[in-house]
Amino acid sequence: MRTDPDKARWKKIIVFRTDRLGDLVLSFPVVEALKASLPEAQVDLFVNPYTVPVANLQRNVSCVIPEGTPEILDLRTLTRFLKSQQYDLAVHLFPVPRLALATFLAGIPVRVGTMYRYFSPLYNRRIKLHRKKAGMHERDLNLKLLEGIGIPTEGATVGLEIPDRFHREIVDRLAAKGIDASGDAFVVVHPGSGDSSLNWPAEHFGRLGKQLLGRGIPVILTGGDRDRTVVDQARACMDGGGTDLCGELDLEQLAALYSVASLVVSNSTGPLHLADAFGTKVIGMYSPYVSAAPHRWGPYGQPENVFVPDGDLCPRCTRERCEMYNCLSTILPETVLARALELLESQP
């Protein structure tokens, strides 16, 4: 690994990741690797506003900057802000032309990004990396950018920590529902998603939940306001059973819940990666097309706990035009239940 000659001067660093929650969680090892190699450096995160609460849980982030606030809304004000912060290094994990231009105009001395975008000349450390063709997990692709500038990445973790007050809040909330977070095994079912890939049917989540409840295992349903319909559909198949927390938890509380859960069952979505980051057992439902495949987007810590429909990967999903749509419905709740029970029984 070639060491960048400017590395000793990197005292203030900004990392850009402005897409979704799962993408951000898979970027946290970058922060950990930077701090391990440059312990005196300040590392700031520039993120999508809705992910700010989770970004604030990363133990080595000094400042979280939400994109699009009035103070940095346009290119001129963003450039002025970046210049005023006197960053030494900018790492673009999610390439965005406007952000690449802003760091260039702000005169940040070292600007890291991939080589093959039309705006890549705005970076002065261009890494030879085709994300779509690399056949690597998103976490490892992020770390490749650091390796390209001489930052060691081996052993980089996620570095999420739950403050005591959020832990106490969720433990108390569960106790009020009759669940002892320190002693009872319980399963969280998250049937919604950001619609970046196909979803396991809500009715299948419900049938799974009903069978878990029938075995005396508490089931909690989570989701945001936009997930209300699918959560209601799932719960209807559970005959109204389970504990419905859809729309009741902010992201810090959701993270706290996942950190104490015995198992989280979800589509391929941010909450799955959030649970995996805490070492919680997960089961993920994944689409059989290349851009959504688990080899890139699966739970990094437990790749064995994913379900994908049988057959070859598709180049892309044509959805309703495909005779197999929705192929995820071929994954039966009973099959998932068997794996869930194995994972629950393996825990102390």
Image: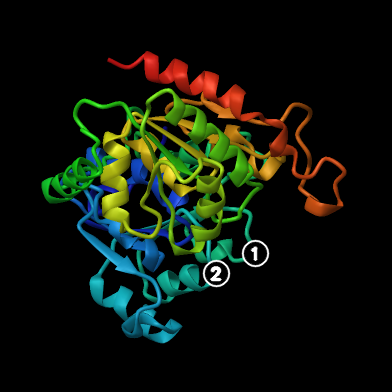
Residue 322 position (above or below residue 313): below
Q: Where residue 109 appears, x then y in whole percent?
A: 35, 63
From the viewer's side, name the closer residue of 65 and 227. 227
**What residue is drawn where x is 19% and y is 29%?**
182
Question: Would residue 131 appear left or right of 28 to someone viewing this image?
Answer: right
The secondary structure type at the circle numbered 1 is loop
Give the labeled residue for mark 1.
118
From the viewer's side, name the closer residue of 280 and 126. 280
**What residue is drawn where x is 77% and y is 47%?**
316
Question: Would residue 281 appear left or right of 313 to someone viewing this image?
Answer: left
How far apart are the alpha carbons under marks 1 and 2? 9 Å
Residue 71 position (above or below residue 221): below
Give the labeled residue for mark 2.
97
The secondary structure type at the circle numbered 2 is helix
Classify 10 Å Cα crowding around label 1: few (below 14), some (14-19), many (20 and above). Answer: few
> Which amino acid type is shown beneath numbered disc 1?
Tyr
Q: Mark 1 or 2 closer to N-term?
A: 2
Mark 2 and mark 1 in contact (Cβ < 8 Å)?
Answer: yes
